[in-house]
Image: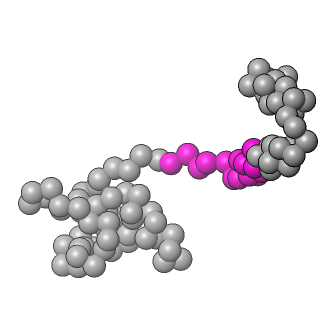
Amino acid sequence: MRPDLQSVLAAARALPPEELPELLGQLEQVRCTAMARLSAPAPVASTPDELVDVEEAARRLGISTEYLYRHHKKFPFTRREGRKLLFSSAGIAEYLKKRH
């Protein structure tokens, strides 16, 4: 048995009977938390986001670079670095996923 649980076991043996319901409630909270973590879906490994230029963004979106330059403000994944117009690759992927 884990050392941290041995102290709980000792408390269960030594506590007065009127305090046992509270201890059982706390143990149930621990059990439910552990079960919730076990049944939760495995975390998805996220790919790092990278900023792509207009040509690459247009290619991924299947549109012309001219259209993208004219309508870039409509897309929530547009980023500006000074005068440079860039696009979040993760944002493009999410946009395409929602669109289809």
Q: Is residue 27 above or below residue 88?
A: above
Q: Is residue 88 above or below residue 48?
A: below
User: What secondary structure prevails in the magenta region?
Assistant: helix
Left or right of 10, for residue 36: left
- Residue 17: name its quadrant: top right
Residue located at (29% from left, 53% from top): 51
Residue located at (38% from left, 69% from top): 61
Q: Position of residue 34 (x, y in %)?
A: 75, 44
Looking at the image, which is closer to me, 59 or 68?
68
Looking at the image, which is closer to me, 63 or 98?
98
Q: Is residue 55 visible?
A: no
Q: How is the image coloured?
A: one colour
Left or right of 93, for residue 41: right
Looking at the image, which is closer to me, 79 or 14?
14
Image quarter hosting the N terminus? top right
Q: Is residue 39 above or below residue 58?
A: above
Q: Position of residue 24 (x, y in %)?
A: 84, 46
| Residue reaching furthest to the left | 83
Left or right of 74, for residue 46: right
Query: Which residues lie in the magenta part?
Result: 28-46
Is 44 inside the magenta-drawn segment?
yes
Residue located at (30% from left, 74% from top): 75
Residue located at (90% from left, 30% from top): 13
Left or right of 71, for residue 7: right
Is 66 inside the magenta-drawn segment?
no
Looking at the image, which is closer to me, 12 or 38?
12
Q: Is residue 77 visible?
A: yes
